Amino acid sequence: MIEIIDVYKSFNGKPVLNGVNLTISKGETLTIIGRSGEGKSVLLKHIIGLLKPDRGRILIDGEDIGDFNTRQMVELRKRFGMLFQGSALFDSMTVDENVGLGLREHSSFPEAKIKAIVKERLSQVGLVDVEHIKPAELSGGMKKRVGLARAIAMDPEYVLYDEPTTGLDPIMADTINGLIAHLQNTLNITSIAVTHDMVSAYKISDRLAMLYNGKIIFSGTPDEVKNTTDQVVLQFINGRAEGPITGINS
Ligand SMILES: Nc1ncnc2c1ncn2[C@@H]1O[C@H](COP(=O)(O)OP(=O)(O)OP(=O)(O)O)[C@@H](O)[C@H]1O
Ligand SMILES: [Mg+2]
């Protein structure tokens, strides 16, 4: 279980997270929605300790990660897979080296087994015979899928997906949504996704939570979101320029 308790974060005096409270249960798939620049990626980075809150706590299975030493943090990260928004692949490494990075660093599997796992993960995201290629030679959507293969390579308990389907064609997006759902159903993985793509959000989520003005202002099942009367949520999910959300947040 992940508990985000009253988390505040500012950058250069500008508040981004303003008292975020959110709990994600074991086995649940939660999607965070919200406008560009609201702090969704910042929130995900807090969950794996890449950013530290100015105030508030993050508990993973009851333990406050703010108290963790370096070794505990390394152990914690092994239990998490993360798909970064820009994929964050290492340009100097091949696809095989990128996807197998965690396995080569943290497992004692023989090289042949690691290669086989990498191949399997790549095929799960619809990629074959790309192991020897460098990220620069891949399309944006292919990079995203390699990032996804890397996120799930180590059989994580928790996977954080930052915009898993952005930039993919609709058919590939549906395949990736299917994969996320499959991981949850078969491996009982707990997932947190961030997306603007409402089709995907409804499809993969047990629950959606909306981040607005630095707080979670709404959380509910896909049906509850569709039937909400909350004007902020309605404006966002229907993509209307008119409504309570005004101006450009930067
Ligand atoms: N490391 C950082 N240093 C300074 N400011 C940052 C840093 N990371 C994020 N920010 C700022 O925090 C705010 C929220 O950024 P974030 O990337 O979380 O937005 P987002 O909701 O993920 O948006 P998008 O949907 O466009 O990805 C932005 O104003 C951004 O400039
Ligand atoms: Mg983001």
Image (spheres, helix red, strand yellow):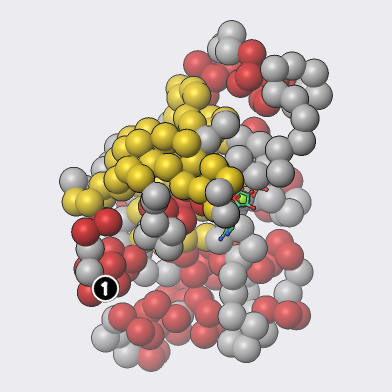
- Vertical arrangement, residue 172 with respect to residue 244, above or below: below
Residue 24 makes an appearance in the image: no
- Count of marks placed on residues: 1
In the rendered image, residue 101, in percent from the top left (x then y), is placed at 44, 81
In the rendered image, residue 222, in percent from the top left (x then y), is placed at 52, 24
Q: Residue 153 occupies which quadrant of the picture?
A: bottom left
- Vertical arrangement, residue 128 with respect to residue 28, above or below: below
Farthest top residue in view: 229
Q: Is residue 245 left or right of residue 9?
A: right
The reply to whether the residue tagged 1 has its Cβ within 8 angstroms of ligand 1 is no
In the image, 15 versus 236, the foreground residue is 15
Q: Which amino acid lies under the numbered mark 1 shown in the image of this protein?
A: Thr
Q: Residue 126 occupies which quadrant of the picture?
A: bottom right
Q: Is residue 26 left or right of residue 162?
A: left
In the image, 111 versus 154, the foreground residue is 154
Q: Residue at x 47, y 30 (%)?
A: 216
- Vertical arrangement, residue 160 with respect to residue 221, above or below: below
Q: Residue at x 72, y 54 (%)?
A: 168
In the rendered image, residue 25, in percent from the top left (x then y), is placed at 30, 37
Q: SS of the residue at dot 1?
A: helix
Farthest front residue in view: 13
Farthest left residue in view: 62
In the rendered image, residue 93, in percent from the top left (x then y), is placed at 59, 87
| Rendered-image quadrant of the C terminus | top right
| Rendered-image quadrant of the N terminus | top left
Label 1 CA crowd tier, 10 Å (few <14, some 14–19, many 20+): few
Label 1 sits on residue = 70
Q: Residue at x 73, y 65 (%)?
A: 140
